[in-house]
Amino acid sequence: MSVLAIVSAAAAAAEEVHGAAESAGLPQLDPAWWPSQIFWLVITFGALYFFMSSKALPAIGGAIEERRDRIADDLDQASDFKRNAEEAEAAYNQALADARAKAGAIAADKRAEVEAEIAKMQAQTDAVLEKDLAAAEARIAEMKAEASSKVREAAADAARAVVETLIDEAPTKDAVDRAITTVANS
């Protein structure tokens, strides 16, 4: 069978059913049926009203009231939690501030101790360096004096040797010392 044949058969069947319904009429619009319809309407409405007023609506009202109470309790509990959290935060901030102040005080104390120790060590080091410097200056002065005397001796020996070579006569030690002193002072 083709699709067109199926569609036309279905349309013909629908028209037959529609024609039969028109000939029988609608019973709900026929006034002869109205008293039984009103009777059953009142019975059904009364039973529904009784059921709704005695069972369903109180249960719904109770559930709504219970929900409202639970929400109010939850809001109260949430406000308590919020207040507790704010108090805990304030306590935490206070503890943090106290800890920072204490840490600053400890750091300042340690810094002062370290600076005092550094100053003490520096004073000790300066004393040792002064002592070493004085000893070094004394050695330098001694070495200068020794070098000066050796230079003086070398100059005296050189002068004696030059004079002896030039005049074939050795000068006296006093004469060489006087000549060196005169040259050194001028």
Image (cartoon, rainbow, N blue to C red):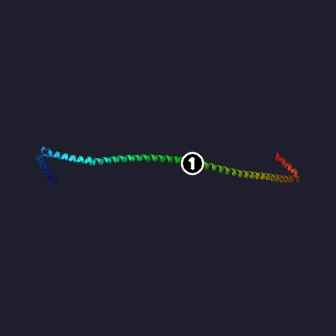
> Is 97 on the left or on the right of 13, as rendered?
right
Instruction: Quadrant for the C terminus, please.
Output: top right
Q: Position of residue 33 (x, y in %)?
A: 13, 46
Image point (31%, 46%), residue name: 61
Residue nearest the viewer, comparing 179 with 91: 91
Amino acid type at mark 1: Lys
Crowding at dot 1, Cα within 10 Å, few <14 / some 14-19 / many 20+, comes out as few
Q: Position of residue 59 (x, y in %)?
A: 30, 48
Instruction: Quadrant for the N terminus, please.
Output: bottom left
Q: Position of residue 83 (x, y in %)?
A: 45, 46
Residue nearest the viewer, comparing 104 with 145: 104
Total count of labels: 1
> Is 111 on the left or on the right of 95, as rendered?
right
Residue nearest the viewer, comparing 79 with 132: 79
Q: Position of residue 40 (x, y in %)?
A: 18, 47
Residue nearest the viewer, comparing 30 with 180: 30
Circle 1: element type: helix
Image point (82%, 47%), residue name: 184
Image point (40%, 46%), residue name: 76
> Is 103 on the left or on the right of 3, as rendered?
right
Image point (48%, 46%), residue name: 87
Q: Which residue is mark 1?
A: 102
Q: Which residue is most to the bottom?
A: 1
